[in-house]
Image (spheres, grey):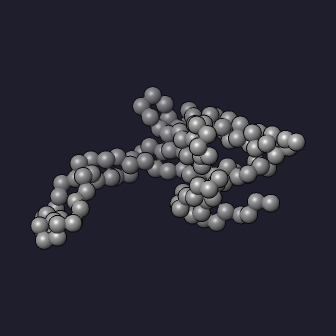
């Protein structure tokens, strides 16, 4: 029997997600753990006077190379078992996540079918 997944926790084939973005689709087989994420845009970071002063005083101070700001792009990730199957889909220049939702559902169904077959194998 599957134990319930608490907010911010997922354990899928040894992989652990520490995320508030997690939700679960239960197919009757092991849960399909899913994260829905808002992607970020990166831009070069301009060091502040404070950062430069800290770097001068403390040589181990790390000044970031980039600043990250939330974008309008979304991404869905399925927990992967490292079998080489597709596990992430997102908004891109040539398609939107909406265009890929059918592929996400197909992958969840395929994983569920594979798990079912393994469970009933003699």
Residue 86 placement (x, y as % from top left): 58, 37
Q: Residue at x 11, y 67 (%)?
A: 56
Q: Residue at x 25, y 56 (%)?
A: 64
- Location of the C terminus by quadrant is top right
* 64 to the left or right of 52: right
Q: Residue at x 21, y 66 (%)?
A: 60
- Which of the pair 34/11 is nearer the observer? 11
* 42 to the left or right of 27: left
List the single residue furthest toward the front: 122
List the single residue furthest toward the top: 94
| Number of callouts | 0
**Residue 109 shows up from this direction:** no
Image vertical order of residue 28 relative to residue 19, above or below: above
* 66 to the left or right of 54: right
**Residue 34 shows up from this direction:** yes
Residue 17 placement (x, y as % from top left): 55, 58
Image vertical order of residue 17 relative to residue 57, above or below: above
* 63 to the left or right of 118: left
- Which of the pair 33/75 is nearer the observer? 33
């Amino acid at each position: 029997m599957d134990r319930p997944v608490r907010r911010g926790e997922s354990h899928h084939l040894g992989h652990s997600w520490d995320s508030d973005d997690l939700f679960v689709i239960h197919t009757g087989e092991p849960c399909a753990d899913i994260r829905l994420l808002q992607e970020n845009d990166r831009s070069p970071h301009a060091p502040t006077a404070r950062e430069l002063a800290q770097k001068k005083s403390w040589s181990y101070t790390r000044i970031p190379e980039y600043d990250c700001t939330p974008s309008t792009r979304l991404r869905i990730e399925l927990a992967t078992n490292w079998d080489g199957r597709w596990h992430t889909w997102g908004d891109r220049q040539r398609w939107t996540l909406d265009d890929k939702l059918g592929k996400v559902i197909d992958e969840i169904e395929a994983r569920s079918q594979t798990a079912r077959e393994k469970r009933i194998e003699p």
